[in-house]
Image (cartoon, rainbow, N blue to C red):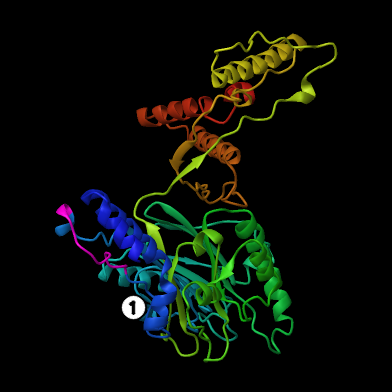
Amino acid sequence: MFLCVWFCQILSPAMALQSGASFARHYYHSSATQVDRDFGSGKLSGFVQVPKFPMAAGTRYGEALHPGPEDDHSDYWLTVGVTNPGGIRAKGDMLLAMGPGIWTLTETQLSQITTKSTARTLRSGGHKLHRNIRAHFSHPAPLRHGSQWAGRWTGVCTTSDWPSTSLQVPWPDEHWETGRVLLTRHWVNGTPISVGGFYGYAQGPTWPKARHLSDQLLTTFTKEVVIGMQGIRLLVGDFNQEPGVLRQQQIWEQYGWCNAQQYGVQALTHEWSATCKHATEPDQIWLSPEAARLLRAIALHEHFADHCTLEVKLQLPQTSAMISRWPRPAPIPWDTVDKANWSPCCTVRYEDGIDSTEFMKQWADAYEKAIDTRLQEQGQPTMKPNNFGRAQRLQPDVQEQQSPICKPSREGEITLQSTLVGAAVRCWFQQLRRLQSLCHALKADKRTPAAVCYRASLWAAITKAHGFHPDFPTWW
């Protein structure tokens, strides 16, 4: 601390203010342990929050005599929580009272009938609070015996105050129809966040193999979310098992995932708390490595009878995250190149005084063109544009982080098994939707000017579509 004060004093006024603010920001992110020892963990009463470090004591000079206001809104603190309310019908006010954020609710007990009414209740109640609530539901629960509307003890629901959508992944039919799995994506200030909701089987006479059945349901989460995705991801729910007991959770830990409460004990000196009947911890939030780095607070609240509400705070930037990437050229198609009796000549020579970087760029370009010429001589398909570019890039590409997904198909049309496919499949599927729309328009055979212009513009979009080399008519 003394060194920090001394260093801030010998700097110029502007540099001193900037350095002190930067140090304070770093201390704010890394001092949760001491603060929690001093002020408690907030068990069942609030968050483990880390106050900002005050400016170093000492003499202020120049501009530092009148520092500007602190920027408390440089980042956004997002609430992500999970609870088991034991059925959410007629509990809309209690759910809305938990505040804005991304909430996953397990054991919703919503049938196909009560799902629609509950969605309307949450939406209308949110409007009264000036909140735009988006509710996403798992497969409806089957009806209870002898009831015309009440669902059985299953179901998952995720509500969000942010633009969001349900993600379609290749669930086995028998897994999706249990109503115990749900995957959604949310865009918070442009930052994509994926949340998986899960309701595990309860150990007992009804489900004697509960642990094995729960592991089976979680295999799709492991394949599609833990291994197949990147970015900020959370797997939350009532697992009906202690953390780390399920085999799939042990695999998550091998990929760097962590249980929020266990991680909080180490990083925030969070005091562990049971989430069910003050005895066990079935309600859990599992954080991907990217999400764990953003964890700033943990809290538990007693909103419902048997289960506590577990929530975490993630510190997100107010603006979209920018990422740097180094695109690499596609591999050269060596299997189509006849290398017998072929010794490519390079016209580029290295001489004293020539910039080595410029020489490498020219040499790589001549090398790729020699291979392309060889393919032309053999009558083979020439290299594609993405096969070129070796040694040409000196700076990384800086672009906004994106997680594009496919739009849901119209009823009666072809649907994708997964909305998380790559760029090439998205281009193909988008082209398929254009062709389907053109078929519908041709069958309708409307002669109005608007219909004729629509068909003409649609055909132009089909012929000029991206993702087909060299163009769609030739590719086809």
The answer to which of 21 and 117 lies nearer the viewer is 21
Q: Main secondary structure of the magenta part?
A: loop
What is the three-letter code of the residue carrying label 1? Ala
Residue 87 as seen in the image, left or right of residue 141: left
Label 1: which residue? 97
Vertical relation: 399 (above or below) 40 = above
Residue 130's image quarter? Answer: bottom left
Vertical relation: 346 (above or below) 55 = above
Figure quadrant of the N terminus: bottom left
Residue at the spot 61% in from the left edge and 17% down from the top edge: 365
Residue at the spot 37% in from the left edge and 72% down from the top edge: 50
Q: Position of residue 337 (x, y in %)?
A: 78, 19
Q: Is residue 70 magenta?
A: no
Residue at the spot 38% in from the left edge and 61% down from the top edge: 26
Vertical relation: 358 (above or below) 324 = above
> Magenta segment range?
52-63
Figure quadrant of the C terminus: top right
Secondary structure of the residue carrying numbered label 1: loop
Q: Position of residue 401 (x, y in %)?
A: 46, 46
The answer to which of 13 and 244 lies nearer the viewer is 13
Pick out the residue farthest to the right.
340
Residue at the spot 73% in from the left edge and 25% down from the top edge: 333
Residue 312's image quarter? Answer: bottom left
Would residue 111 be seen by someone viewing this image from the given angle? no
The answer to which of 420 and 450 lies nearer the viewer is 420
Would residue 107 be seen by someone viewing this image from the given angle? yes
Q: Position of residue 113 (x, y in %)?
A: 48, 73
The answer to which of 307 and 263 lies nearer the viewer is 263
